[in-house]
Image (cartoon, rainbow, N blue to C red):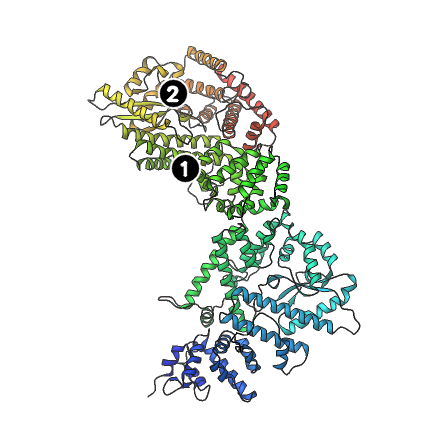
Amino acid sequence: MTRPARGRLARYGFGTAQSDGGSRAADLLGPDGLGLWRIEEQEPVDERAAELLAALARAADPDLALRQLHRLVEAERRSVDPPALLDAVHADPGLRRRLVAVLGASSALGDHLVANPEQWTVLATAPDGLAPTADGRLDLAAAGRLTAATAPVAVLRQAYRLALLRIAAADLTGGRGLEQTMAALSALADATLAAAYEIAVDELPAGTPRPRLAVVAMGKCGGDELNYVSDVDVIFVAADDADLGVATTVAARLINVCGLVAWPVDAALRPEGNRGPLVRTLASHLAYYQRWARTWEFQALLKARPAAGDLALAREWIEALAPLVWTAAERPEAVSDVRSMRRRIIDNVPPKELEREIKRGPGGLRDIEFAVQLLQLVHGRGDESLRVPGTIPALRALVTGGYVGRADGEALLRGYRFLRAVEHRLQLQGLRRTHTVPTDPAALRWLAAALGCTATPGRSAVESFRAEWVAHATEVRRLHAKLLYRPLLESVARVPADGLRLTPEAARHRLEILGFADPAGALRHLQALTGGVSRTAAIQRTLLPVLLSEFADAPEPDRGLLNYRQVSDKLGSTPWYLRLLRDSGPVARRLARVLSSSRYAADLLAREPEALRLLAEESELAPRTREVLCDGFAAAAGRYADPEQAIRAVRALRRRELVRIACADLLSRAGGLAPRPERGSEAAAPLADVTGVGTALSDVTDATLTAALRTARAAKPGPPGLRFAVIGMGRLGGYESNYLSDADVLFVYDQPAGADEQAASAAAHGIAEELRRLLGVPAPDPPLGVDADLRPEGRQGPLVRSLAAYAQYYARWSKVWEAQALLRARFVCGDADLGAEFEALIDPVRWPADGLSREQVVEIRRIKARVENERLPRGADPATHTKLGRGGLADVEWAVQLLQLRHAGAYPRLRGTRTLDALAAAREAGLVDPADAAGMAAGWTLAAQVRNALMLVRGRAGDQLPRHGVELAGVVRLLGRDDPGEFLDEYLRTARRSRAAMERVLEA
């Protein structure tokens, strides 16, 4: 009894698709078929048969390859005497490999060979051992020998099929890579167009002059990236009006011939599309593109290439339109046009095919092509190396030029090659135009095999294909969104083309136009940043035109460029820096805004350049909560046993948080650059106003003091049970810190029961002194001064007091101004119970139940007048001094604090440390006229905003708003205003109203 045929033939892959047990394959291979298989013995008849069976087993579809081979042999036996195919296949391993690969991958080409059984010879190895040429050239002579037809169109059709057969064989056997295959198919299209052109010209009536007509390849053909089955996009160009009539006849016949021979010719990319004339003159084309063309039409011209006819005229046409192509991106709507066109393409894909579309669907070929073409349109204006028609060469040029990151570029190239390989195999199977992955299991198995996917333990070949497809599509989609929607694109597109070419002459001229005070110095910075041929220099050449425009909007462009160079010098060699600026959202423009607007932020970034990563994420520009900061600072300090190392780590974190807050503040009024809260994010909202800034800065100071106190206590532990607390005063206590505020504090301790009072006092002093010392150690970050001058008796009094000593002092000797200072007192860090006890101790002092006596009110007025007269700096302008000037911070704060001292005992809602909250409570309680409350709130808010802005702009403390100059312009820009004069008038007007309201409150 013989073993089932399936047992042995299944090892070769036969019978899998039909599930017929291999009986069909046995019939085709047996004595009545090809004579390669002994049915009884279940083995090949000889070694040559075994080699052919092994070749069939390697085909994408062994059953299809076997059936087609059998049909081809039978057809040859009927028409050729003597038949030679099987002997040639046995004798020529190259022919065997090429023929079987074609038969197993393309039923259409197999059918063609069966219909023309003598044409397999074009796949035979040449006498010199070389594979047949597969470069897309037409061999009309060979086609004439291998077909009985003599008509030019019929011969051309046969020549096209023979060339296509050779290209497919080389592609399927690894003789050609993807790029070579696409180039060969495009060359074949060129040759076919040229042959059809000659047929059309030869058919003209005798005596008709030969027209000057150019056939310009567009689309995939123009980009030398044609696939197996596609329309060939062209545009027809006539030299002048005299050629139009004949040229139109030739063009129409060319389209007809190509349709009969190979594929449809699509001329819809011409001006006005199918509604426009088939052929236009060069002058007519130029007039149309100058006046009427839309962005997508210029995008299409990126792939224009001479293909047939008058090639010199085609080159002249391309050269004439090039200046229009390379300025199209400067149109205001250009970038959005390309993006919306891509969205429309996706919208037009039938929903049931969307996920299977490898060309038009998300993560498909169009995603790659649109991203590359938009980058070409924008950056190619200044970089001629990007002016290439093909997607792969353009992508490589974008990577080389630094416009696309290496990893991103490689991912897109891999995705493009994979998707094109899938497209080629799908189309080659039936020579049908398709871009949809099939759903049929057998078709999927064939596709996976044709692509070389193999099964692995636990995963079939189809599953391997799907996994690879999903991975590529996901990455392509991500990179498409990253590149196509890169905010830098709009910025680069707005820069004139001349501004993208940073030659010394062009750069100097542009710097003068942009308003740089020292163009020569700025040029030296540019040369230092962009000199050489390194990738870093290439990326800088991409970024700088945009950054220069941003710097030019600032009052001091030179300083912005200098700051940028300093940051670049520190980070230029790090792999992430320039990639972050180029690829990550609005980082580049945000950095330019920060560096050109603020010396304070620029100095911080110079010390901590890696902090600019914060500019990349919206959530990173939201201030951290007090709890998060305290935990993080404490953890950083806890990593070190040495107190100075511990505090150094804390101060580094503080510096980073100051960068975060300053950048968020600087960008909050910068239009599209402003950080926005992310949906679903649990992070705090971006800074919205000056109170948010004050709270964020106070929280950072709280966290710093908390970590410093823990470190100081670890270094100076003191007696067991010693309780110690830090009380915030002044702006820290009121959550109204500014960028350069000291930490106004009081230190309080409570000795453990039974402990020596003197020892406890000495230990508490040691802790306080150690805390101040640690925070005062010189370091490369903004200092945090710890100021305890608001303690009882000021500098003459002890630095630290016990809770009992505070109680005794405030009960016996406290003055009204000390009660006023305590209005902002709050617990900051240390022993929370002790902090609560201290607050309970001072509450009756700062919120007296009976309010103030007349004498105390008069005393407060007297002190206010004295402060105003004596503390205002000499030469200061009281009208524009934000702190002590008329209607400024001090005016409002004294008025509010007087209201608190007088009425907080009776109105609990007044018992807060924040100025604006207390003012609002006083208004709601009817203690102040609503108009006066609004006037003082506006005055305080504007003065606080200006004071913060002055510190950001100058990089040092300052309370005086200048009446002219770059600092005033910088403040105005930072606050989101336009005209310095108008802003100054607004400030003076607001301050006058605030002053008048304050006077009414103090005199009430």
Q: Are marks 2 and 1 in contact (CB under 8 Å)?
A: no
Q: With respect to residue 987, does 364 lie above or below?
A: below
In the rendered image, the vertical position of residue 44 relative to residue 60, given as above or below: below
Three-letter amino acid code at disc 1? Arg
What label does residue 614 carry, if any?
none
Against 937, is 794 above or below?
A: above
Indicate the position of residue 61 as horizontal and vertical percent values: 46, 75
Instruction: Give neighbour class at mark 1: few <14, some 14-19, many 20+ (Cα, 10 Å).
Output: many
Q: Nearer the viewer, mark 2 or mark 1?
A: 1
Residue identifier under label 1:
624
Q: CA distance from mark 2 to mark 1?
A: 28 Å
Precedes in sequence: disc 2 or disc 1:
1
Q: Position of residue 583 (x, y in %)?
A: 50, 47
x, y percentage for residue 8? 37, 81
Mark 2 element type = helix
Instruction: State left or right for residue 310 relative to residue 341.
Output: right
Q: Quadrant of residue 910?
A: top left
User: Looking at the picture, which amino acid does disc 2 mark?
Assistant: Leu
Residue at the far top in the pictured view: 855
- Residue under pointer 2: 822
Where is 83 relative to 224, above or below?
A: below
Drawn side of residue 548 relative to residue 652, left or right: right
Between 533 and 673, the one lying in front of the other is 533
